[in-house]
Amino acid sequence: MSLVRVQNIMSNELAKRTVFSRPPEPPQEYLLNDPTSSIFIGITKLFSVPFTWTFANLTNPHVAVVGITGAGKSFFVKTFLTRASYIWNTNAIIIDWAGEYKAWVKQSGGTVVALGKGDYINIMDLSGMKPIDRSKQIMNSLEILTDISEYPEQKRLTVEAIEQAYVNFGFASAEIPEMGKEPPTLKDVIGLLEEKVQEGTYEYPAELENAVYRLRQFAREGEDYFSRKSTIDLGKLSSSGLVAIDLSSLPDEKFRALAALFILQTLKEKMRSEGWSAAKGLKALVVLDEAWKVASDDRSDAVTIVREGRKYQFGLIVASQNPTDINEAIFSNVGTTIMLRIKFEKFLDYLQGSLNFSGFMRKEISKFGVGQAAIDMSFQTSVQFPDVFLIERIVGEIPLDVYTVTIAEILSQQELSDSNVQKEYYFEKIDLNSKFIQAELSSEAINSIFKELDTRNRLIDIRSLVQVMVNEKVSKETIVELLRSVGLSDAIITKVFVYVT
Ligand SMILES: Nc1ncnc2c1ncn2[C@@H]1O[C@H](COP(=O)(O)OP(=O)(O)O)[C@@H](O)[C@H]1O
Ligand SMILES: [Mg+2]
């Protein structure tokens, strides 16, 4: 008798066997949602189902996006924000660490707030908050960013001076402030502490001096980004359409983190005070891209927004190359995780350990191309299918593919400081492409130029761009024509060619 018997099995019998009853993709009813109230992301890899995202049946609206540099995290975020705005009129506030959203936001008609480059935030602004609560928040930021928590006496002196500054400006500690009344700044707080130093009667002068020193780093002339009258209306941040807070011009990570923490605090307060409304979808999405310090600290309000966001229709999107930089309270609570290409074994271990996907999936994630993704969703009810599935590619908003060409380095000091002189030029991909076609560039040349631009994150200085064209054997006449057609003067064009070989 042979050991193997051939059986005839009906297909419905077959379907009951584990391999078929646990398909590696959620069933269609979980993937394909009403297009008028969900966001299209891409086509699933296995069964080619259009996946549209909604948080209606998820534990919450928050999204974590992880993947190596260049994998497509920011591209996903832009696509997601654009569609959320179409569908739900969702406002977006991007805390833009590296300034990589600025060109896109301008192109999309949004607002760019450039801290350290003309825009200021007074971290003592109350935006409707009681001074006593605001004082606590300022202390909270100082605790995250400085060593103040190790020095209780200095902490006490600092908080006392902050509260006193509010009182001196006519704000009662425990009362909702009057609208439109000018609050003090950190400089006033420092002033109060300095007065105390001058008096010379305080028991521990070293403590006092250290407290002054710590605050002064945020208020030095030329670096007083947070201790001047605010140039933006912070109370309106979460209802102003698309806003990018560009932190790239601030001098260091500490300043960037202070700005980010402050903005999160303000948004959290706004979220709570507005409460729930019958608005469709999401009211606002807050984006933290590569903001590890702010995403990783337990005391950061990113954690509060994740805990309470759902009931107020506020979503948080955290993007990072390193999933272990995302605070566990955030990472283990997001309703959706988008995994783009991940290379490091230890990051793959972490993801696989927390999201529990197969070895097959792990392998796929490690060899993804740009925009390919594995998605994990946490549903509110327990489900009978693996919740991680593959997307062929995040399908983006083509008209918003923006290329930035900067001419800053060939401008004179005087031209640079002249706000009438344009320093950056923005092109949509289709426009740039048609300019190349008009200039009769070969399609090989066009492809290589775009490839080069893409490896530079779509930001290139004019000389390098011209060099790329020269390398592609585009004639000098054609290049000059092209540069003229975008509005560059002959004087500038001449300068461009100086270093081109
Ligand atoms: N899904 C996609 N489809 C087409 N192009 C993409 C996609 N994802 C990323 N890109 C392009 O790849 C480059 C790197 O993407 P980016 O989002 O900046 O990566 P990351 O933020 O992960 O470093 C950009 O030029 C971007 O436009
Ligand atoms: Mg990015």
Image (cartoon, rainbow, N blue to C red):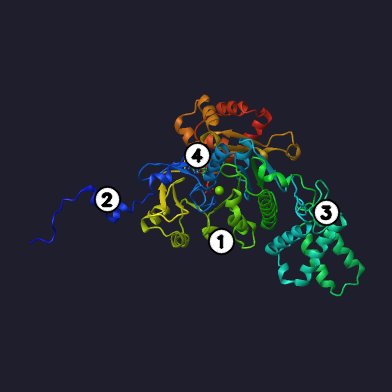
Visible in this render: residue 291? no
Mark 4 or mark 3: whose residue is earlier in sequence: 3
Mark 2 or mark 4: whose residue is earlier in sequence: 2
Q: Helix or strand or loop: what does disc 1 sit on?
A: helix
The residue depicted at 36 percent of the width and 56 percent of the height is 360
Mark 1 or mark 3: whose residue is earlier in sequence: 3
Q: Are marks 2 and 3 in contact (CB under 8 Å)?
A: no
Q: Helix or strand or loop: what does disc 2 sit on?
A: helix
Farthest bottom residue in view: 203
Front residue of this view, candidates 16 and 449? 16
Q: Nearer the viewer, mark 2 or mark 1?
A: 2
Q: To which residue does mark 4 refer?
A: 396
Q: Is residue 307 left or right of residue 352?
A: right
Q: How crowded is mark 3: few (under 14 residues within 10 Å), some or many (20 or more)?
A: many
Front residue of this view, candidates 454 and 409? 454
Q: Position of residue 391 (x, y in %)?
A: 42, 46
Q: To which residue does mark 2 refer?
A: 15
- Say whether mark 4 is within 8 Å of ligand 1: yes
Q: Position of residue 420 (x, y in %)?
A: 74, 33
Q: In this view, does 249 lie to the left or right of 54?
A: right
Front residue of this view, candidates 478 and 369? 369
